[in-house]
Amino acid sequence: FIGYGGRRLLSLLNKDKLKRVLAIMLDENEFLGTHGIRSLSKYHLDHPFSYWVGAEEHKVPYLPAESDTGVFGGNSNWRGPVWMPTSFLMIEALRKLGTAFGPTLKVPANGRDGPLRNLFEVAEDIGNRMIRIFTRDAAGQRPLYAGRRKFQDDPYWRDLILFHEYFNGDTGEGLGASHQTGWTGLVASLIDEWRRPPQPPSR
């Protein structure tokens, strides 16, 4: 595909397929959460994925935080949580596709309807959702810390930011290990890029 500005794109997704994927990904009742992209669609909260092994039925439901089974060797935490690296890769993919398709390709902001946005704007919205995990809301609380009063209110702790392994798919609460600077630290790149004061044009 030769796209915007003569840029060439080699991709499994043409425009029509991309729009169909984004219709589900950007639906807040499916993959798009308040704080990033969920690992499993919220659709499965009411419609668990079901499969049979012999005479035994197994189900994979949407769970916003930790798993309710140890079948995968402990806390199986892929059933709804937001992971920084996968959301970050989604942002990067959208930006690359936006470069190829150009600003005229627009999709509904929430997947199926609503105001139209180009792919760069969609990527920025996802990035802002991820940043909001760590920033204080109108009540001065960080979603990251949920009900942990020591981290929310104590003046000696409230500004010490932890980099959790993954996050609640509905609330943004930090879960798992709290020192994952290797991948959750990617949020610093988003903050640097989208929160940096405007710079004067270079000569």
Image: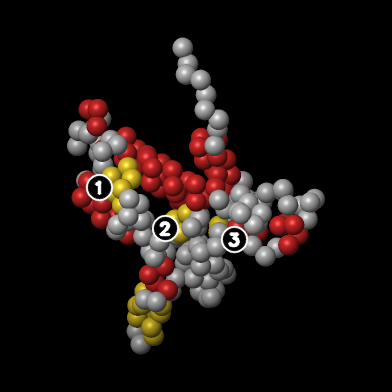
> Residue drawn at (54%, 47%), measured in percent from left and top?
131
Residue 42 percent location from the top left of the image: 41, 67
Sequence order check: which comes first, mark 1 or mark 2? 1
> Which residue position holds label 1?
13
Residue 173, numbered circle? 3
Q: Residues within 10 Å of mark 3 (few under 14, many from 20)?
A: many
Closer-to-camera residue (68/121): 121
Residue 122 percent location from the top left of the image: 38, 46
> Residue drawn at (66%, 51%), measured in percent from left and top?
162
Q: Residues within 10 Å of mark 1 (few under 14, many from 20)?
A: few
Q: Amino acid at mark 1?
A: Leu
Residue 84, numbered circle? none
Residue 115 percent location from the top left of the image: 32, 50
Closer-to-camera residue (125/173): 125
> Residue drawn at (72%, 48%), measured in percent from left and top?
159
SS label for mark 3 = loop
> Residue drawn at (50%, 62%), measured in percent from left and top?
169
Whether residue 115 sits left or right of residue 192 in the image: it is: left
Q: Amino acid at mark 2?
A: Leu
Q: Amino acid at mark 3?
A: Glu
Q: Nearer the viewer, mark 1 or mark 2?
A: 2
Q: Nearer the viewer, mark 3 or mark 1?
A: 3
Whether residue 151 sits left or right of residue 4 in the image: it is: right
Residue 32, numbered circle? 2
- The vertical placement of 138 against 30, above or below, is above
